[in-house]
Image: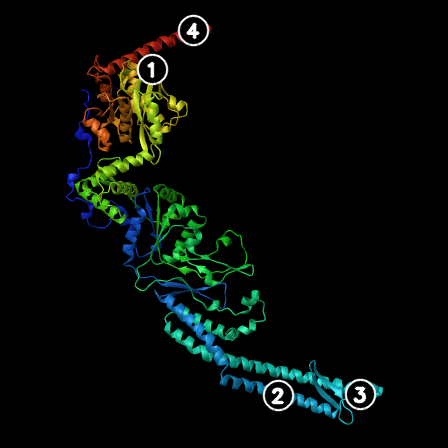
Amino acid sequence: MRPKPLNFETIDHRCDAGLFTFETTKEIEGEFAPLGQERAVRSLGFEPVSAANRYNVYVMGPAGLGKHEIVEKILRQRARSKETPRDICYVNNFAEPNKPLAIELDAGLAKTFKEDVDKLVETLKNAIPAAFESDAYHAQRKMIDDTFKAKSEEVYGQIEEEAKKMGMAMVRTPGGIVFVPRKENGELMSPKEFHALPQEIRDEMEKRVDLLNEHLNEATRTLMLFRKELFEKIKKLNIETTKMVAGDMIDALKEAYKKYDKVQSYLEAFEKDVVENVEDFLFKEEQAGAVPMAFTALFRPSFRRYEVNILVSHGEGESAPVVYEDNPTYENIVGRIEHIAQMGTLITDFTLIRPGALHRARGGYLILDARKVLIEPFAWESLKRALMSEEIKIVPKERMIGLISTLTLEPEPVSFDIKVVLVGSRLLYYLLYNLDSDFKGLFNINADFNEIYEKDEKTLHLYASLIASIAKKGGLLPLSKSGVARTIDFSSRLAEDSTKLSLEIMKIKTMMEQADFFARERGRDVIEDTDVERAIAEMEYRSGRIRERMLEEFERGIVKIDTEGKRIGQINGLSVIDLGDIVFGKPVRITAVARVGKGKVIDIEKESELGGKIFSKSVMIISGFLKGRYMPDKPLTLTASLVFEQSYSGVEGDSASLAETCALLSAIAQVPIKQNIAITGSMSQKGDAQAIGGVNEKIEGFFDICRLKGLTGDQGVVIPRSNIDHLMLKKEVLEAIEGGKFHLYAVDDIDEAIEIYTDMKAGKRGKNGKFPKDSFNYLVEEKLVEFVKNAKVLFKESETSETKKG
């Protein structure tokens, strides 16, 4: 029995606004919930206590599902139940300055520690000079200086006394001490008088001077040893004075942080450095006054070595951090060491260490975009290394690639406990899982986000809440219930299934934002169904230039498509063009030619290298169908060719196999088929019709051509019955179907399609194994049998001709 057109109720899957009890979404309360993502939510919540760094999560799914927003919201909820992680700061390693020390403190204490150390340094800068200017210090210093002075006078006095006995005078000059001969009256002898003396007297005096110089040198060495002792006493005095000032202050600080062993060790080293470098605290600005301005900074003492570099600080009572790193470069993940220019040279120290995302997310969660991490040099390897070693080590990237060999900082690694959440596509997940041996050991959990959701009365209300939350969060006008219904239709259209709802939140949100614009433009305070329809139409119009050009070519007859009459071996197939932001259907004429041959169905698209592998497979299926149905016990002596007319680009997929089979059978049986009906659908080797994608766009594509050429009331499209649930057609197509101007037919197999196209019974084999004589299949089989007979004659004549030639 020839299939009848589908009734309108079977085709119309639009949402009924009467299902909703609210008037606008303003009446709907509730926050945004991850609708339909139960599997992903459970995966994100799986956190074993042991081996936490192995149970990181890979969140996978197509773009536009709102994965980042959902993941961040779920993790922030979980973070509230976690302890606030400790603060991290770097301090100077006084023993090895190129290896700064990392200190961990309770949450919120790093800032206090920094303030305490800064205050201590400022206090010491005032207190130490004051102590060294005190009367007590000066008195002790004077005693030491007086001791040296007395000793010096005693030693030099002895030398002077000895010189007198020898008739010599000890004279102190700017160049040092010299010995000069005296005259009998006690006065100093002049050089002229000295040279006037007899030679033997001069020689004697010179011997006395040499002896006195020897004694003077011995005395000077004695004084130098004594001076050294005095310097030690001064140094000891300075140390005692410095310790007296700094010791109590540092001890008080040590008491305040007594439970932190690293702080205790640091403060001990701090005190030792202050004592050893007390001159820095005694520096006066006038000391640098004579130095050129450009070099002044070099002569001023620096107290940077006493600073505390806070890497990460948390407020007391804060929840665990949830960090999303939008630019996951190597430095932004593990941290970096900055440099400053000084006198034409780049220098660095521990105060220029900067945290990475791993530091900031320590004790909490780190969200990263998988693709971005993989394309950044060293980022992926550094992330894996940190997770496996459970510590963050800052190494300059230049050193990793061998660009520098100079001494640089080697900050102490910081241990961490973190959960990394990678967000990416399914393709990336499977590539990493199979090609990266470390990945499966570190990312043991996958959170697979669903892009579609079941559609029933309960879920429609949940989806309405989702729409309401999108509008509320985006600052959009509320939607009327008719606006919600049309948005749900748009969602089902995105899902390509009337029984499903799309969870592509970004596309839904984009459409709603545009509908909001048109509602406001009309001066309305609610988004109606007309605003939603206009937004969808405008989105299509903006991207529709190519589609309009295509329709123009059909209208002018440049591209041939018949929408009336009958033709042998010619049928209207349907294809889909996907340009990313717009998808539309394009009718295509398919023709077939059949004659006697060697049992080969030629795919012209494949022969011209325009057909893909799946398309070629469908042609092979057609060949198998012909053999299995019509010539099960005879050779198929057929040569047939199939072609997509006026197709100049690649063809892929098997959704035209029903159309190709109809055209080929028409060419074999020499029975004309209708041109007012187009067809789409895949076919099995047994002749069953199978579902295809893009059914809505394909139907609408042929409808547009029929409307351009004039709707006659008998035009329509044949689809597989299994595609009925996928119908979410545009309003104008539904109106034409409801008005009887356009029709849809659903078929289960090729026979039903043939009956629609030929108005003949397809026919089934009887008990005698033959098709009824008045059936279409009988004509096909008879023609194929005739091909066999003709082939035998042709092959026999060919053999005879070849024999004669021989």
Q: Which residue position holds label 3?
A: 204
Q: Residues within 10 Å of mark 1 (few under 14, many from 20)?
A: many
Q: Which residue position holds label 2?
A: 151
Q: Which residue position holds label 4?
A: 801
Identity, as a three-letter code, of the amino acid under mark 1: Ala
Identity, as a three-letter code, of the amino acid under mark 3: Glu
Q: Residues within 10 Å of mark 3 (few under 14, many from 20)?
A: few
Q: Earlier in the sequence, mark 3 or mark 2?
A: 2
Q: Earlier in the sequence, mark 3 or mark 4?
A: 3
- Give the number of the mark in front: 4 or 1: 1
Identity, as a three-letter code, of the amino acid under mark 4: Ser
Residue 443 locus on image (x, y percent) = 35, 49
Q: Residues within 10 Å of mark 4 (few under 14, many from 20)?
A: few
Q: Quadrant of residue 342?
A: bottom right
Real-space Cα separation, disc 3 to disc 4, in angstroms:
151 Å
- Say what secondary structure mark 2 lies in: helix
Residue 315 locus on image (x, y percent) = 33, 63
Q: Is residue 734 visible?
A: yes
Real-space Cα separation, disc 4 to disc 1, in angstroms:
25 Å
- Say what secondary structure mark 4 lies in: helix
Q: Earlier in the sequence, mark 4 or mark 1?
A: 1
Q: Say if mark 1 contacts mark 3, CB within 8 Å.
A: no
- Say what secondary structure mark 3 lies in: helix
Identity, as a three-letter code, of the amino acid under mark 2: Lys
